Image (cartoon, rainbow, N blue to C red):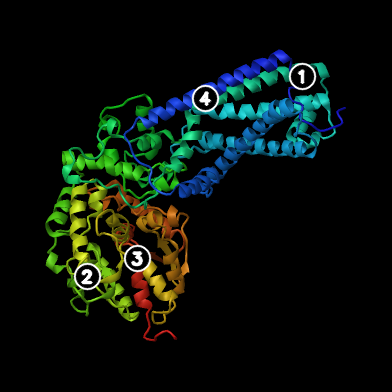
Amino acid sequence: MISTPSRPTFWNIPTVDQILIYVLGIAAVCFCAWGIVQGVKRIRSGTAKPVLGSHPERLRRLWSEGFLQKRILKTTAGKAHFALFWGFIFLFFGTAIATLDWDVTRLFFGVRFLKGGFYLFYKLVLDVAGIAALVALAYAAWSRWVRKGVSLEASPRFAVIIGSLFLIILSGFFLEALRLAAQRPEWASWSPVGNFLAGLCFGALPESTLESAHRILWWLHGLGALGFIAAVPAGFFSHIYKAPWNIYAQKLAPLGAAPKIENIEEQEAFGISDLKQLTWKHRLDFASCTECARCSSVCPAVRMGTPLDPKKLVLKLQKATKEGASEGPVSKIISEDEIWSCSTCGACMNACPSRINIPDLMMELRTHYALEEGKFPPGVAKTLQNVASVGNPWGLDPGSRLDWAKDIDLPVAEAGKPIDVLYWVGCAASYDRRAQKIARAMVRILKSAGVSFAVMAEERCHADFARRLGEEYLFQTAAAENIANLSQYTFKKIVCACPHCFNTLANEYPQFEGGRFDVQSHVDFINDLIREGKLPALAGNAVPTSYQDPCYLSRYNGLSEAPRKVLSALGTELKEPERSGADAGCCGAGGGQFWFDGSKTQRVNVIRFGELKATGASRIATACPFCLSMMDAAKAKEKDETTQVRDIAELVAEALTEEKPAA
């Protein structure tokens, strides 16, 4: 019986076996390092792209998203991956600590620290880590072969991947069990799993049998662990180092700011049409895919059965770049139908643990078709021509832009006359009869709060959807015109009642000279008015309401709390759908889909309408004229005559009373 707790390194293992395992271990580590270097070289072979932004912020995101995995912890699968990740982290550091104890402090200083109480705690922690990893692997297998999650690959390849990790950990537990059964130390209970297996499986075996089995299993476990190390850079496991790298190198600029083509008049090629145009960051994006299919599970294009599946798209590009292809047409890998099916809602990137930026990639792929080949989906070319010729997608008379306000006293901005707020109406609220009610509600709110405001007579479409469709030239032309017009007037801030207008003016106009303005979403602005007591008292309205988060507010700009605070101030009984906030379902109108003839993603509005109705709400509130239109269309398709669909501005305007708030 052993009297002092200490790690029995190489118990029952002959010296020759110890020497051989060291040789194999060094070889495995060298092979792993060589593979990582080659992988990095392949990624860095792409064209240059600077990593801009604060490195402390990048480190913070790496810790939060890479190590704490806060982005994916909301789901059961995310919790399982968290357990697997940290289980292996602890097992890895456990092995590193054991190596330090035996090969460094013992050899060079004659000191061992894996003994006594610390050793017992060390054993307990590793047992817990191992069990956590096994449970996570079991869940991964169940998800693929029993539950059969969306786009999860249930193949022999993943059977080997999951099975090999499971056997490495399980063999470690049985290895411990054989040793405990042979040694029977008093502190065996500090290794609860090994101790349980020792009593269950090996209690009656003679010591010689236990030692023989231990030596065989020791080799199997050791070779499995070293094989895993050597295989890290070769395939699926390479995301262990690529995903953290991609998280660190992720876009720090506002997510809603699409990449700008600098000096567009001087460019000879536009967008991405060939693999040689991919930057190293594109290649890192593809290489860091974990194949978890979280992107596919939230993608509206997948829900509608379009050709686009973001996971498959990334893996096709990953395969092409991994096989060493330095050039070749992207059209042979990704079809036009896939490219045009994206609504740029950002749900894929929001769900991705590796932060793969698919929306920006889709816009770059579309830019090639738009500016080099002049190709667009049916219906879009006419809409773009309307924006170019008369400044709005409907092709209506620009002189009628303010007709919605003929019967109200609407202040119009004048040069040299300072105002506090420039209200950016937007095309939808200017020309669409239903959305015009939002504009009228905003005017009533602004007047009731006593805000000094005006609208700009020269306002024209900012062509956000054109940029999302790859028509960057039209977008930049519209931006230059709008910025020049805005610069004539003196105001403190711009308030937008459309998330697309807000995102464009707040996040994309700063890419241009003179384009920096203080821009606020109308929900945020209204919330400030209520919080500061600047509005008359609001009449209570307890109608059960479900809120549809617009993608360009909640997902791209993090504005999901302000609209809920406004609804709460109205006394609304808020009914939250299963997916809300940054995880909310898309209405299907983004990325120019609203203007497509026969767009499949537009039909996702019926699915989203059903999710909102399933909460038991009798009213749907939103903060986007396009979400409003899509929910109205779904309501009509479902022949629902009872559910109200309203913009938050309308609800606030209706709730205004004549009484002014107390000072």
Question: For this rendering, which residue is in front, 392 or 8?
Answer: 8
Asked if one can make out residue 617 in the rendered structure from this viewpoint, the answer is: no
For label 1, the SS is loop
Asked if one can make out residue 615 in the rendered structure from this viewpoint, the answer is: yes
Residue type marked 2: Tyr
Residue type marked 3: Gln
Assess disc 4: are there few (<14), some (14-19) or many (≥20) residues with their C-alpha within 10 Å of its C-alpha.
many
Q: Could you say which disc has been placed on residue 520 in the image?
A: 3
Task: Give the side of residue 516 with respect to residue 575, left or right.
Answer: left
Q: Residue at x 14, y 59 (%)?
A: 395
Compute the Cα span from label 4 to label 1.
29 Å
Task: Give the side of residue 658 with respect to residue 293, left or right.
Answer: left
Mark closer to the observer (2, 3): 2
Based on the displayed image, in which of its 4 quarters is residue 442 positioned?
A: bottom left
Compute the Cα span from label 2 to label 3.
17 Å
For label 2, the SS is loop
Return the residue at label 4: 32
Return the residue at label 2: 489
Q: Residue at x 49, y 46 (%)?
A: 59
Disc 1 + disc 2, Cβ < 8 Å = no
For label 3, the SS is strand
Return the residue at label 1: 12
Q: How many marks?
A: 4
Compute the Cα span from label 2 to label 4.
61 Å
Residue type marked 1: Asn
* N-term-proximal mark, 1 vs 2: 1
Q: Could you say which disc has been placed on residue 337 in the image?
A: none
From what the image shows, is residue 271 above or below residue 618?
above
From what the image shows, is residue 587 above or below residue 49?
below
Residue 124 in percent (x, y) is at: 73, 38
Based on the displayed image, in which of its 4 quarters is residue 142 positioned?
A: top right
